[in-house]
Image (spheres, rainbow, N blue to C red):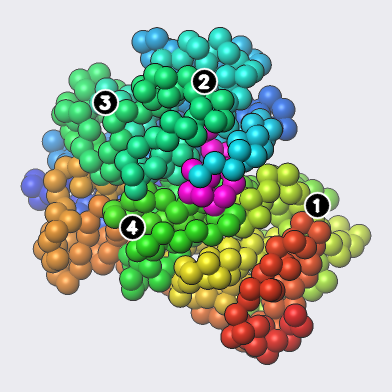
Amino acid sequence: MTSENPISGATDSTRYVIGVDVGTGSARAGIFDLAGRMVAAAKHDITLFHASASIVEQSSGEIWNAVCHVVKDALSQAAVSPDRVAGIGFDATCSLVVLGAGGQPLPVGPSEQAERDIIVWMDHRAVAQAQRINATGHEVLKYVGGRISPEMETPKLLWLLENRPSVFAAAWQFFDLTDFLTWRATGDLSRSTCTVTCKWTYLAHERRWDESFFRAVGLGVLADEAFARIGQSVVDPGTPLGSGLTANAAAELGLRTGTPVATGVIDAHAGGIGTVGADGEPESCLAYVFGTSSCTMTTTRRPVFVPGVWGPYFSAMVPDAWLNEGGQSVAGAAIEHLLSMHPAAPDARRRAEDAGQSLPEMLAGLAAQAADSLSGAVMLAKGLHVVPEFLGNRAPLADPEARAVIAGLGMGNDVDSLVALYIAGICGIGYGLRQIIEAQAVAGAPIERVVISGGAGRRDLVRQLLADATGKPVLATQAEEPVMLGAAMLGGVAGGLFDEDVEDQQDLRAGHRCHPGLARGALSRLQAVAERGQRDPLVWCANLFCTYLATPARAALARVTFAKMSDALAVQMNGLGCAL
C-alpha cells in the first residue's frame, strides 16, 4: 500500500521517520516525511492461536519477522535510502511476552509450544486472578479505575505463577510487546512509562513500583528481585534507547546501524499521539481509537479518578499530564462477530469481497444509500437494540463477565435486516462511548470533542452515528494512518528532529508546535468533522440510548448515571424525547 508519493520532488537531504504498528492481526510500517505525509506503507498478517474461548496467544518470533518484512517492504516502495531515515518508533498491543535465558521463547499455555510465548491482550484466562487482586482493595488499584482488568499484565503474571510455575521460574524477562520490540531492536531493557504505567501498575507519578502491592497480590517474588524481570529502568516515550539499532537488527530491518530508536507506546496511545492535538487543547479532546477493540484517552492536568475507567496515569501519553483510558474489549471485532451470526452474512461477505470491500464497509454504503441522511440511517435499526459486549465491559462497568444483548431481533434473513443489525451494532458502540464520556464528566474530566482513528473511523456514516449517539462532534484528521504517525513522531523525537521546548517548528509548518506525545498542526490536521444531526434522528438516538442503559448489564450503572447526571444533561435528554 502506498500513499500519494511526494518523494518524487524530494532532495537528497530530505529526512524521513518510520512508524511501526503491531496490532492484533497484523504488523504495519509507515514512512513519513517531516510534514507528516505518509509516503509508503506495508502490512503483514500475524497469527492468533486460540486454545479455548479465553486463551489467545501469539509468537514474538513471528511478529519480529513480520516487522522486519514490512519495514523493508515500505523502504523499497518509497525508494528511501536507509541513510535518510532519522529515527524509528514502535507501538504494539499491550500483550505479555515471556522470554527465557538468552531471549529464547517460553510456552505460556497448554500447547507446550515454545514459539507461543505471548499472552495476547484480549486473553481472559486470568479473570479469577484479577478478581482476587481486586479483593485486596490495595491503594494501587486507585490508579486503574478501582478495579484491575484481566487484560492487564499483573493478573496474567499471577496466572503464570499459579498455573505454569516452571515457566514463570525460567523466565528471564517479562515484556510488554512494545518493550520487547524496542529491546529486540536495540538490546536496551528499558521499559516505557506508557506500557508499565497503563498495564503493569507502575506508579509513574512517583517513579516506582509499589512493593507492598506485589506482595499483597501474591507476586512478592518480583519485589524480592527488585523488579529486574519487569523493568528497573523506566523511561518516557520518545526517549532514545541504547545506541540505536544494533548491527543485527539493522541488517534484519534493512536500516543503518545506530539509527535512533524511540521508547515506544501501546498502539492505542500512538493513535492518541497522532490525533489528540489536532484541534484545540488536548484536555478538551477525547482520542478514540476504533479498531479490533476500542480505546478512549482523555488528558487532564490534574489526576481525575473515574470509577471503572483505567487511570489516572501520569505521563503515559502526553508528557507531564494525566491520562484516563477507557474503551471496550471488542469493538470492530464485536461488529464482525455480530454480523457473522446473521444468515445473510456469508453471501453478503462474498459480494463485498467481489467489490473489493470489507463487509462492514459495504453495509455502511448500503445504509447511506437507503437513508435520507447519514443521521437518518439510525432509523433503519428501529426496534433493534444491541449491547455488543461479547468479551465483557472494559469501561465504565469494569466487568469482564458482562455479555452481549440483542433485543428486538426478528426473523428477517435478507440484506436489509443485515444492514439494520450493522447499524444497531454501531449505535451500541456509540452508546458505550457515551457512557464513558458521561462517567468521566461526572468525575471531573469533561470533553468537548472526539478525535477518531482506527479503521472504522474512516467511514463517514460511522463518524456521524457516533456523533449523534454521544452528542459530541467527531473529528477525523488528515493523517492517513494516525497510529503509525504517532509511532513515527516518537521516532523523530528520538532522532532529535523535534525540540519540545520550541514553540514554532519551522521543520513542520509555521505557527504549529510538536513535542513528544502531542501531535499538532502539520503532523495532525483535521480532515472531517461530524456534527450532531437533525432533531428527529436524535430523538430516536436518545430513546435508543435509554434502552441501552436499561439492559440487564447496565441496570446498576444506569441508576448511578441518572443519580449523578447534571441538570443540564437531564434537560437536554428530556428535550430529545428520552424520559429519565
Q: Nearer the N terminus, badge 3 or badge 1?
A: 3
Label 3 and label 1: CA atoms lie apart by 49 Å
How busy is the neighbourhood of tag 4: few (under 14 within 10 Å), some, or many (20 plus)? some
The amino acid type found where label 2 is placed reads: Asp
Q: Which mark is residue 321?
A: 4
Query: Mark 1 falls on what kind of element?
Result: loop
Residue at mark 3: 188
The amino acid type found where label 3 is placed reads: Asp
Residue at mark 2: 117
Of marks 1 and 4, the one in the foreground: 4
Picture coordinates of residue 247, whole percent (x, y): 20, 20
Residue at 14% over, 59% down: 501
Give the residues in magenta: 140-154
Residue at mark 1: 342
Picture coordinates of residue 450, whole percent (x, y): 47, 68
Q: Work out which quarter of the rendered image holds the C terminus and state it.
A: bottom right
Q: Are marks 4 and 3 in contact (CB under 8 Å)?
A: no
The amino acid type found where label 4 is placed reads: Ala
Q: Quadrant of residue 551?
A: bottom right
How busy is the neighbourhood of tag 3: few (under 14 within 10 Å), some, or many (20 plus)? some
